[in-house]
Amino acid sequence: MTTSTSEAAKAWIRQRAESLGFEACGFASAQAPWDAGERLRAFLHEGRHGSMDWMARTASRREHPTRMWPDARSAIVLGLNYGPASDPREALAASDRGAISAYAWNRDYHELIKGRLKTLGGQIARRWSCEAKVFVDTAPLMEKPLAERAGVGWQGKHTNLVSRQYGSWLFLGSILTSLEIEPDAPEEDHCGACRACLDVCPTQAFPAPYQLDARRCLSYLTIEHDGPVPESFRAAMGNRIYGCDDCLAVCPWNKFASEAHETALHARESLRSPSLEVLCDLDDAAFRKLFAGSAVKRIGRDRFVRNVLYAIGNSGESKLAAAAARRLQDDSPTVRDAAAWALRQLAT
């Protein structure tokens, strides 16, 4: 494409992306070299991925966009704002209720975004007779460094993407295409001397700025980690029962953020700060019903109730002891272990 043709194509794609509800849209070369693959190898070499073995198995495909698809020429990175109406850390003060990460307060964003990406990718393929493939973060494509190169934001010291317009609250999706499109200028790092995200972490999961040890991260421990959570981290979980927003929520760039326009991302009241006592009694059917369409459902009932019991143990609420005691006979050994721990904590 000539420069003028490329700019016209970008304007057309941005207009279509906006009509589908995407607030951010940037373009990057899919073939230019980058150092993200080297950082990934170092992360895996240190074992900081914990039990996420799939990261090591797909490492070679993650190292560069062309490892996913050699014919890719350009990347289109889309962002969907999921800004919460209030600071999600407010839920941490309610000891008898659970704190769920803001991204999971309503619809599972993977399904929400993927359909729109397919629509946009199909429109691009038809208009320019090219190929287009769509990705959300379930695929082995490193979207955050790609988003930085596309000018959508930058990877902050907490390793998450930060946007000058939307703060920490952007869901990402990507389209790789065989179409050659002029890339946008990459976004610069605007973290400066700030280390708020590093200092707020309850488990000191950041060995250094821009580095994360997932094995210490409460999002990893409550979502990805199966089996009992190491006892050294249980107290730090507080009442967090799915994910942790601390490093995201404390970012000063959130002062420019706004509440999500997409109504499917507005909080369901039943998920904003649910009762620990009610959640503790969920069987598999009730769990699936309550979290239908939510990202929470993917971790399964046993892992979720495990988290709820840790929160009960941290609550200091003796009224919750009966709920924990009911789980001592649970079918899951992990749940039974968590129930026994919770009762010991409440007793002391």
Image (cartoon, rainbow, N blue to C red):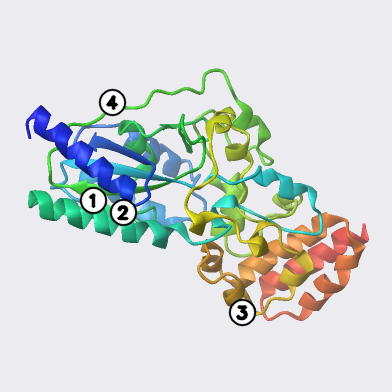
Residue 27 lies, with reference to residue 282, above or below; the image says above
Task: Say whether marks 1 and 2 touch (CB < 8 Å).
Answer: yes
Q: Marks 1 and 4, Cα distance to the nearest angstrom?
A: 23 Å
Kind of residue sitting beneath label 3: Asp
Q: Marks 2 and 3, Cα distance to the nearest angstrom?
A: 30 Å
Q: Marks 1 and 2, Cα distance to the nearest angstrom?
A: 10 Å
Residue 214 lies, with reference to residue 328, above or below; the image says above
Comparing 211 with 48, the one in front is 211
Q: Which quadrant is home to the N terminus?
A: top left
Of marks 3 and 4, which one's residue comes earlier in the chain? 4
Task: Say whether marks 1 and 4 touch (CB < 8 Å).
Answer: no
> Quick check: 83 left or right of 200?
left
Q: Marks 3 and 4, Cα distance to the nearest angstrom?
A: 48 Å
Kind of residue sitting beneath label 1: Met
Local packing at callout 4 (Cα closer than 10 Å; few below 14, some 14-19, many 20+) is: some
Residue 214 lies, with reference to residue 310, above or below; the image says above
Whether residue 205 is visible here, answered yes or no, is no
Which residue: 20% across, 32% down?
32
Which residue: 31% across, 42% down?
77
Task: Identify the residue position indicated by label 4 in the image.
Answer: 185
Q: Secondary structure at mark 3?
A: helix
Of marks 1 and 2, which one's residue comes earlier in the chain? 1
Q: Secondary structure at mark 4?
A: loop
Q: Horizontal and vertical percent for residue 317?
A: 88, 60
* Badge number at residue 135: 2
Q: Nearer the viewer, mark 1 or mark 4?
A: 4
Task: Identify the residue position indicated by label 3 in the image.
Answer: 284
